[in-house]
Image (tube, grey):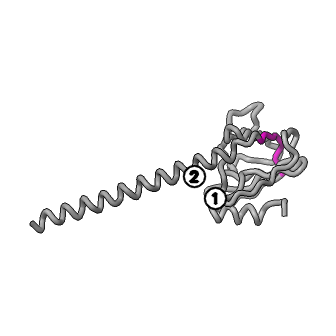
Amino acid sequence: MLKYLKYLWYIILLGFFVAIIIYYNKSSDIATKQSVQYLRNNVEFEGYVTGFEQSDNHAFGVIHLKLTKSNTQEFNKVIKEGIYPYRIKGDIAELYCTVSVDRKKGDIVKLVSEEQIVYYNPQNSKEEGSIFIITDPYNIDFVKEHTVFK
C-alpha cells in the first residue's frame, strides 16, 4: 500500500508541473498577442546609426538614429505593460532592441512595425531583427538611463 502512495505522490507532482507549464504557455501567448497588437500601428522609418549603447542583459541596447525617412514626425506613446521598442521626435529616433556586435555607426536601419521587423543595411544585407514591447524592468531602466529623450 505504501508503495502505491509513493507512485500516487509522483503522479500528483507531475500533474502539478504540467498544469504550471500549461498556465505559463497560455499567459505567454496572451502577452505575445498583446505585443503584436500594440506594434500594428503602421510606424515605418529608416535612418542611419549615430550611436548605440549595449547592456549586459543579452545584448539589449539602445540604437540612436538620424532619420532619412519616416511616416510620422513623433511617436512617444505610453503603455502600462512596458515601453514601445522605438521612439521618434523629428528626425531623431531610438530603437530599443538587441544590439549586434556587428553594429557600427553609419549602418542603415529600417523599421516596419506592422511586421515587427528591423532591417539592417537593407540595400546589401539580409540581416534583420525582431521588435517587441519591452517589459523587462532592467531593460526599461537601461532605456531610461541611455535615452536622449529626457
Q: Earlier in the sequence, mark 2 or mark 1?
A: 2
Is the residue 3 above or below the residue 128 in the image? below
- Splitting the image into 4 quarters, where does residue 134 fall? bottom right
Q: Quadrant of the C terminus?
A: bottom right
Taking the image as shown, residue 28 lies to the left or right of residue 55, namely left
Q: On the image, numbered disc 2 is attached to which residue?
A: 31
Q: Residue at x 69, y 45 (%)?
A: 39
Query: What secondary structure is marked by label 2?
Result: helix
Q: Position of residue 125 (x, y in %)?
A: 71, 33
Magenta stretch: give its range: 43-50
Taking the image as shown, residue 68 lies to the left or right of residue 87, namely right
Is the residue 35 above or below the residue 136 in the image? above
- Residue 135: which disc? 1
Q: How many marks?
A: 2
The CA span between labels 2 and 1 is 10 Å
Mark 1 nearby-residue class (10 Å; few <14, some 14–19, many ≥20) = some
Q: Residue at x 69, y 42 (%)?
A: 40
Q: Residue at x 46, y 55 (%)?
A: 24
Does 39 lie within the magenta span? Answer: no
Residue extending farthest right:
90
Query: What secondary structure is marked by label 1?
Result: loop
Residue extending farthest top:
123
Q: 53 or 104, which is in the foreground?
A: 53
Amino acid type assigned to the residue bearing label 2 in the image:
Ala
Q: Residue at x 9, y 66 (%)?
A: 1
Taking the image as shown, residue 126 lies to the left or right of residue 7, namely right
Q: Position of residue 68 (x, y in %)?
A: 88, 40
